[in-house]
Every structure is written in structure tokens, then in C-alpha cells.
């Protein structure tokens, strides 16, 4: 697989230009790796370490600290279910259980066919419309175990 420096050298250079302290470019480069590879692979972390002149362990420490960086390949439809307090109080757990049963996977996993991945996440800042979830970043509100099948059926 071509590296980020081969795929989009101008983006790598632009990031490095904006951060005179090389290590400060870690997070933008992790976002770029996610964009290029679809997740932050071990190979991407090695490449970032090489670019920054640091160790892969340093980069992995940053990538694994922030839960938003996917360290495994995601499904075509990545479902993030908020299980924080406001959503929890109005049915996030039954919603999560329903999705796990329907998809046959647990939070943090991907279906064998690669169509879906599922992740329990912290507050998505839509507490007034709880329970809510994101599919590939698009927000769905007042989603319940009772009405989520309609949403799943609408996804190709
Ligand atoms: S607690 Fe679920 S959106 Fe805030």
C-alpha cells in the first residue's frame, strides 16, 4: 500500500509547515492516516513516527489515548452509539443490545462481511434528543431499540 508521503505529499508537507515542533503534528497526521487508510494501522503509525523523528510507541500512545482514532478497519457503515448518561437514561443500553443482536457483533467489532462496525461512545452533544447515534458521522436522534431497524434497513 502506498504511503501517505506517496499518496498525498502536499498534505503531509502542509501539516508539517503548520507545526514547527514536529511532535505537535501527531494528531493532524493521525487524522490524515485515517483519511488515507480508512483507519490508523500499525504501518501508518510507523510512517508517522518516521516523519516526526519519534518512535512508533510514542505515536501509538497518542493514537490509543484518543478514542476517536480507529485502530482497526471500520465497517462500511460505522455506527457509534452514545451510552453516556442522558442517552443511558432513555434506552441507550437496550438500543445497544438490540444492535449487537441484530448485527451479531459486540461494541468494538466489525461484521464479517465488512458492512457494519459498532462502537459505544461518550456524549455526542445531542443530549436533548437522546438516545442518539452516528452512522459515518451523520447524527440520528431519538433512536430506540424499537425504531432502529428502520434505520438499518435504509443503509445500503
Ligand atoms: S449523553 Fe448521549 S448525546 Fe449526550
Image (cartoon, rainbow, N blue to C red):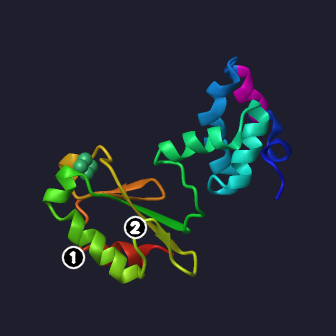
Instruction: Give the position of the N terminus as an image quadrant.
Output: bottom right
The residue carrying mark 2 is 107
The dot on residue 129 is none
Where does the image place residue 129, in percent across and percent down from the top left?
21, 52
Q: Residues within 10 Å of mark 1 (few under 14, many from 20)?
A: few
| Left or right side of 132 for 13 | right
Seen at 82% across and 38% down, the residue is 9
Where does the image place residue 101, in percent across and percent down from the top left?
34, 82
Q: Nearer the viewer, residue 86 or 65?
A: 65
Which residue is at the far top? Answer: 20
Seen at 26% across and 70% down, the residue is 95
Q: What range of the chain is rendered magenta? A: 12-17
Prevailing secondary structure of the magenta residues: helix
Above/below status of 71 relative to 100 = above
Seen at 70% across and 29% down, the residue is 15
Mark 1: secondary structure:
loop
The dot on residue 146 is 1
Answer whether labels 1 and 2 touch (C-beta < 8 Å): no
Amino acid at each position: 500500500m502506498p504511503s501517505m508521503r506517496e499518496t498525498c505529499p502536499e498534505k503531509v508537507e502542509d501539516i508539517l509547515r503548520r507545526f514547527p515542533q514536529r511532535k505537535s503534528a501527531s494528531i493532524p497526521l493521525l487524522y490524515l492516516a485515517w483519511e488515507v487508510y480508512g483507519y490508523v494501522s500499525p504501518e501508518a503509525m510507523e510512517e508517522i513516527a518516521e516523519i516526526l523523528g519519534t518512535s512508533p510507541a510514542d505515536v501509538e500512545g497518542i493514537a490509543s489515548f484518543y478514542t476517536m482514532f480507529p485502530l482497526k478497519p471500520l465497517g462500511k457503515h460505522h455506527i457509534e452509539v452514545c451510552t453516556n448518561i442522558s442517552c443511558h437514561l432513555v434506552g441507550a443500553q437496550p438500543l445497544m443490545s438490540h444492535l449487537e443482536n441484530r448485527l451479531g457483533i459486540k461494541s468494538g467489532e466489525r461484521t464479517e462481511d465488512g458492512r457494519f462496525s459498532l462502537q459505544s461512545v461518550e456524549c455526542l452533544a445531542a443530549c436533548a434528543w437522546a438516545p442518539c447515534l452516528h452512522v459515518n458521522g451523520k447524527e440520528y436522534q431519538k433512536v430506540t431499540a424499537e425504531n432502529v431497524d428502520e434505520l438499518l434497513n435504509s443503509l445500503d
